[in-house]
Amino acid sequence: MDSPCACHMKQTPRSEDLKADVGRRISRVVGQLEGVRRMVDEDRYCADVLTQLAAVEKAVAAVSRIVMRDHLETCVTERIRSGDDEVVDEVMDLLRKFS
């Protein structure tokens, strides 16, 4: 059996405000996706479904930007200040995933 990825072992304390904001946004995205599922079940017009899916994608991207900013302001900054410049490779990999 494969050992768990080291990234799953890391923990990042987050502010209660950030947790609440991200939580609200994710709940909204889940609601949007449930709406899209209903639209498909109801045989709604494809363009309307696609419009709603585009809105979901933008909402998820907004959550990603919020978490990325927090990551840069906390984890990355702390690691660079401690002399760990390998974090730059991690950030570059993350930027590639989101571009």
Image (cartoon, rainbow, N blue to C red):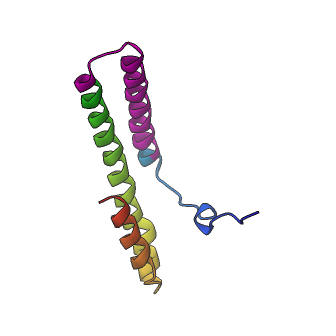
The C terminus lies in which quarter of the figure? Answer: bottom left
Q: Residue at x 36, y 18 (%)?
A: 39
Q: Position of residue 37 (x, y in %)?
A: 42, 23
In the image shown, does 45 or 70 lie closer to the viewer?
45
Principal SS element in the magenta part? helix
x, y percentage for residue 57? 32, 41
Residue 57: in magenta span: no
Residue at the (28%, 42%) spot, across then down: 58
Residue at the image point whose x is 45% and y is 74% from the top:
78
Q: Quadrant of residue 80?
A: bottom left
Quadrant of the drawing holding the N terminus? bottom right
What span is in magenta? 19-48
Could you say where residue 6 lies in the image, as x and y percent from the top left?
62, 68
User: As drawn, which residue projects farthest toward the right?
Assistant: 1
> Could you say which is closer to the camera, residue 99 or residue 61?
99
Residue 30 horizontal/vertical position (percent): 44, 31
Q: Observer-nearest residue: 81 or 69?
A: 69
Q: Does 38 appear in magenta?
A: yes
Residue at 24% across, 30% down: 51
Q: For residue 97, which quarter of the picture? A: bottom left
Q: Residue furthest bottom?
A: 83
Compared across the picture, whether 80 is left or right of 11 comes to left
